[in-house]
Amino acid sequence: MTYSTLTNHFNRISHIESALGVLHWDMSTMMPQGGAAGRGDQLATLNGIAHGMRTDERIADWLSAADGEQLDDWQRANLNELNREYANATVLPAQFVEAFSRACTQCETVWRKARGANDFASLAPALNEVVKLVREKAQILSEHHGLSLYDSLLDQYDPGTRSADVDVLFEELEGFLPDLLGQVIERQERAGMVALQGPFSVESQRTLGLKIMEILGFDFEHGRLDVSAHPFCGGSADDVRITTRYSVDDFTQSLMGVIHETGHALYELGLPIQWRGQPVGKARGMSMHESQSLLMEMQACRSREFLQFVTPMLRDSFNGEGEAWTTENLYRLYTRVERGLIRVDADEVSYPLHVILRYRLERALLSGDLQVGDLPGAWRDGMRTLLGVEPPDDRDGCMQDIHWNMGAIGYFPTYTLGAMNAAQLFEAAVRSDAEILPGIAGGDFKPLVAWLRENVHGKASRYSMSELMTRATGRPLEVSVFREHLERRYLG
């Protein structure tokens, strides 16, 4: 069968992608600074090889021939994804792919140093080059697919999602979130909470994180936990590498980072093994991926049920005693809402406002309405308007995220789409299986993970995100479920 020839070819491409995933992980965790230039060449070369394989002239004939063969539903869905990947790959010249990879690697390296030094001026030239190349990429994709510049990039991360739909959802969110934020902060100030007193040793935090990963269902024979400047999940589906970062003043930051990235990892580990290496066997876009991390972090592990279970573990880990270490006080701390500066540390009420800001800024950068040199000021203005705070420096302002530095423009909306997906999926899971909440209260996540395996992980990319959500929850994505969740948890 020609279809088999096609899938064998893409299996080989997936092996290169897996190697790239591990090289990226190493660059962020263990690679010495002096290896940056060589690593950039390695990544560029491997990306070039993979791109050459993706654009092999024989693929067009194989796709055409396979379309006439008798295929089952999964194979037909895979063929559709293969057509999509081939179409996306062939529009980008190999020379551009290598140049883009080099520019992003260089910018990411500069960013790591510039952020630590709070030196946006040193980052601006490298970031400007990346933004220029992203515009070129968007123009090529736009002309080929008949999409707007921004939609051509958004579609790479969340197939089928369009900015017009995002605008409607984000406008609805912005219509109630700022007021809700103020109401919740006022209510929590009246209720009060007792702060936890550190320091909290990094080793104790790491040990606790590993225990929680095991409870959630992480398979340590197929993954590991490390440290990086920006928490992430990488590697490959058979070897999932997650990272966190530690602060001796606040263990909740690292713990929730671990839980968040474990949610990503569980999705990767739960994808159907029989379709590994094929496009249909991949995660269904980044908003679905974010839903899996946020479902664990925000829906399950900030619930009263989970805090009831984990309280004794927290006390034992940090020798905690007294009123500060009661379940009720820990719940208040874990659901604390504030007008913070840092997106990755934000609570679930303010988080979407961080994303809305980035969404608007990256669209302006792409269109040319905003120049890279003006980004710090635009960032401060946006934070003031949406969240009522202003960053004192660029380190905790426009340089806090890695995404734009690695060329990932069009990615940010998936975080908030993922939060809404998470609320809707968790509500459906709890409604369909009465054992899930008692399981979480007892430290047993098997019922929840089993539901996710059946309704999300195991479906991989067989369906569109909209169809997947409808099949899993009975309706397409709606803001109302997310809003009801926030009001129930924070005002109920």
Image (spheres, helix red, strand yellow):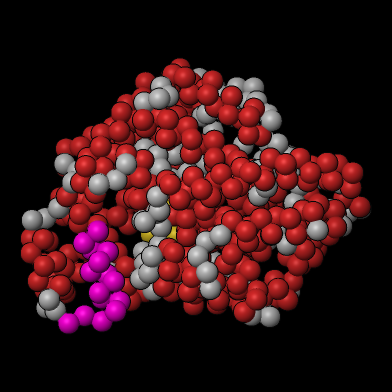
Residue closer to the observer: 354 or 97: 354
Q: Quadrant of the C terminus?
A: bottom right
Measuring from the top left, give residue 402's x and y in whole percent.
47, 37
* 492 sits left or right of 240 in the view: right
Can you say whether 309 is above or below 179 in the image?
A: below
Q: Residue at x 78, y 49 (%)?
A: 333
Measuring from the top left, give residue 111's x and y in whole percent.
45, 29
Dividing the picture into quadrants, the one containing residue 486 is bottom right
**Would residue 210 be seen by someone viewing this image from the given angle?**
no
* 103 sits left or right of 351 in the view: left
Dividing the picture into quadrants, the one containing residue 451 is bottom right
Q: Residue at x 14, y 73 (%)?
A: 66
Instruction: Give yes or no for residue 76 being in the magenta stretch.
Output: yes
* 430 sits left or right of 238 in the view: right
Tell me the chief SS of the magenta region. helix
Measuring from the top left, give residue 460's x and y in whole percent.
40, 69
Q: Quadrant of the N terminus?
A: bottom left
Q: Residue at x 21, y 42 (%)?
A: 143
Can you say whether 117 is above or below 18 in the image?
A: above
**Would residue 303 be seen by someone viewing this image from the given angle?**
yes
Q: Which residues are magenta?
A: 70-84
Measuring from the top left, give residue 26's x and y in whole percent.
41, 46
Count of marks placed on residues = 0
Instruction: Give yes or no for residue 476 being in the magenta stretch.
Output: no
Q: Residue at x 11, y 55 (%)?
A: 56
Residue closer to the observer: 387 or 14: 387
